[in-house]
Image (cartoon, rainbow, N blue to C red):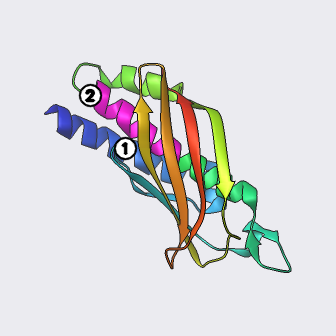
Amino acid sequence: MSSSAHSSALIEQISNYMNTQIPFQQLLGLRITEFASERSEVRFHWKNELVGNTPQRILHGGVTATALDTVGGTVILASVIERLADSTPTEEIIQRMSRVGTIDLRVDYLRPGRGDEFICTATIIRSGNKVAVARMEMHNQDGIMIAFGTGTYMVG
């Protein structure tokens, strides 16, 4: 198997795992729709259980932060997989991914979280051997930016 095929297979396996086996993501309805080191995407639909401001029907800020953190972590994981796929056994890559964690998360809330569907995207700002940084955005289905953030993740 070529390194890009190996990388793609592993990314698909991790994406399926994250979409079906992480209870908190399932509770919120988060689903990974793109999983690549260039750009990753997470989407979810409005549901009443996610409300933070009931009278105004606004998404809870913690849901926004969680979705941004999830998509930031997703792009970072894809980067780790792609960087290591050429020279590292799959078991070692999986072990390394299990140590990936959020060090710092900054979220700027620009507008109230209103919409029927929310689309979060992430790109990598910097990816090193120990730490990686991602930039994330959340838009609603009309393309209105609701929030953006920066996440710093431990990768080594």
Q: Which residues are magenta?
A: 72-84
Q: Earlier in the sequence, mark 2 or mark 1?
A: 1
In the picture, the disc for residue 13 is: 1
Please state which of the two labelled residues, at mark 2 or mark 1, is closer to the viewer: 2
- The answer to which of 106 and 50 lies nearer the viewer is 106
- Residue 49: x, y in percent? 76, 69
Amino acid beneath label 2 = Ala
Figure quadrant of the N terminus? top left
Circle 1 sits in a helix, a strand or a loop, which is it? helix
Question: Which structural element holds mark 2?
Answer: loop
Q: Residue at x 65, y 43 (%)?
A: 106
Front-lying residue, 152 or 100: 152
**Is the magenta region chiefly helix, strand or loop?**
helix
Cα separation, mark 2 vs mark 1, equals: 14 Å
Vertical placement of residue 99 versus 45, above or below: above
The kind of residue on which mark 1 rests is: Gln
Neighbours of disc 1 within 10 Å: few (<14), some (14-19), many (20+): few
Residue 29 position in % (x across, y down): 60, 63
Residue 96 is marked as none
At 68% from the left and 70% from the top, the residue drawn is 113
The residue identified by callout 2 is: 85
The question of residue 58 being in magenta is answered with no
| Residue at the image point whose x is 75% and y is 63% from the top | 60
Mark 2 crowd level (few <14, some 14–19, many ≥20, 10 Å Cα): many
The spot of residue 139 in percent (x, y) is: 54, 67
Q: Residue at x 75, y 73 (%)?
A: 58
